[in-house]
Amino acid sequence: MIARIIMIAYYLISGFFVFITVKNILQEKESRDRVVLYLVTLIPFMLRLLRIK
Amino acid sequence: MKTAGTNFKLLTAAVFVILLIAGAWPLIEHRQFPVEIVCGPGVTEIRHLSHYLPALKGTPADTPVFILSGAEPGGSVLVMGNTHANEPEGMLSVAIMIENAVVEKGTVYLIPFFNRSASLNTRPGEGYPLYFSVKTPWGQKKFRMGNRDASPLDQWPDPDVYIHYPEKQMLSYLDIRNTNRTWPGRKNGLPMEQVTFAAMELLRQERVDLAIDLHGAETMFPVTNCIVAPEKSMRIATLASLTVKSMEGFENHLESSPEKFRGLSHREIGDYSDTLPFLLESPIPFLDQPTGAKTEQLFLDGRDDFLLSLSRKKKLFVPYDESGWPLDRRVGQHLSVSLEIIRQYSRKAPHRAIVIKNVPRYSELVNNGTGSYFQNPASAEKSKVVKL
C-alpha cells in the first residue's frame, strides 16, 4: 500500500517537473544553452510519465 | 550570446521529440513483442499463476502455467524458466518441453516465463541486445532478451534495504525485484513476493514432488555447470549429476544450498513445502564481465577471445576452448539434467513416478540444434499458439 502511494507520488512529482521545465523553456528568452539543458532534463521525467523506462 | 527565440525553441523541441521517439520506440516494441509457443500434444491444460493467488490476475507479473497430465496417475514436477530473464536457456528448455513432451505417467507443470515482468524489461545500460533469434528449419524464431529483475514499471519503489519475509535477513535493495530472492513469498507482499507465493501455493496445493528452477551463470563464477540442492534433495541430485557426467559426457557438479542465505528457490521451497527443490546452472559466457561487446552472436555461440585468454590462465570455472559454449549445449544440459532428476526420483519412489517421452537430450540438441525442436506458429492451429 505504501509502495503504491509512493509510486503515485512519484508520477505526480514527475508531472510537476515536466510542467515547470516546459514553463521555463517557454519563458527563457536569453540563453540557448539553458533551453537545451531544460530539454535534456525533461527526458527521464517524460520516459517515466509515458511508462517507457 | 544568441537569444533563445521562438524558432530556436521550435527547432530544439522538434529534435527532442525525434530523439525521444527514436529512443523510446524500440523499448515500447520490446515490451509488447509476443513470444509465441505452440502447445504440443502433451499439453492438457493452461492455467495462470493467478489461479493460485487471484491478486495477480491482470497484472504484468501473472504468467501461464502449462500442465501436461499423463494417462496414468503418478508424481508431479514443476519446471521453471526465466526466473532470471537474462538467462533464457531455462525458458528455451521449458518451451521445448511444452512443444514436444508427452507425459505417460504423472503430471508436469511448466512455467516458461516465471518472472514475466523481467522478460519485459531490458538492460540497455550494459549494451544487451533487445532480442535474440534461434535458427529453425522454417526460419528464425525470435525471443525477447530480458533482465535479471522485474521491471521498475511494474514494481517500484525499491526499499533502501530489502528485508526478506519471513526470515528477516537483510538483502540488497535490488533483490526485492529478483524472483530468486523472494521465495517463499508473501500473499499481501510486493508483486514479486506474490509471484513466488503463488508458486508455493501451486507446489503445496498440487502436492508437487519436484521443483526444478533453470538458470545460467558466468564462467568466472564457481556456482556454474552444476545442480544446487539442499540436504533433502542431495541424494537425487548426486545420482543425476553422476549419471549425466558418465552417460552423456558433459561436466556437472553439485553445490550445497546454503542454509543461511535466504530467499532462494533451492532453499525456501524445501523449507516451506514437501517438494524437493533443484536449481540448475549452465555456463553463459555472455554474462561474464570481461568479454567483448554483448552481441546476439556472443549470446548464441558463447565464443569470446578475452574469456579464452582467461581460460588459458585458469581463471574460469568451466572448461573453455575455441568452440565457446554454444546455446545448444546449454539448453541440452538443462534438458538432460532435468530429465535425469525426474528419472532418478521415479526410480526411488515408483508409486510417484513421472514418465515423460519425446523430450530431446543433450546429444540431440548439440547435433540438431535448439531451433529444430520448435514448431512454426504460422502454420500451427491458432488455438494451440500461446503468446507470452
Image (spheres, rainbow, N blue to C red):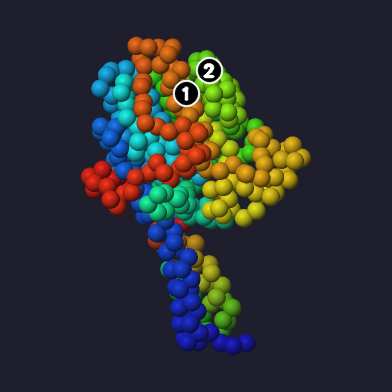
- On the question of residue B341 being in view, the answer is yes
Q: Which mark is residue B239?
A: 2
Residue B235: percent from left, percent from top? 52, 15
Distance (Cα) linking label 2 and label 1: 8 Å
Establish if B374 lies above or below B296: above
Q: Position of residue B109 (x, y in %)?
A: 34, 29
Q: Residue at x 39, y 19 (%)?
A: B209
Q: Relative to the observer, which residue lies in front, A30 or B239?
A: B239
Q: Which residue sits furthest right?
A: B313
Q: Secondary structure at mark 2?
A: helix
**Residue B313 in the image, given as x and y percentages of width and height:** 77, 40
Q: Amino acid at mark 1?
A: Glu
Residue at figure coordinates x 32%, y 17% from the top left: B74
Looking at this view, is B171 or B32 the one in front? B32
In this rendered view, identify the residue nearer to me: B324 or B180: B324
Q: Which mark is residue B340?
A: 1
In the displayed structure image, the side of residue A47 where residue B290 appears, left or right: right
Query: Which residue sits at x=57%, y=47%?
Result: B301
Determine whether label 2 and label 1 are within 8 Å by CB. Answer: yes
The mark nearer the N terminus, 2 or 1, is 2
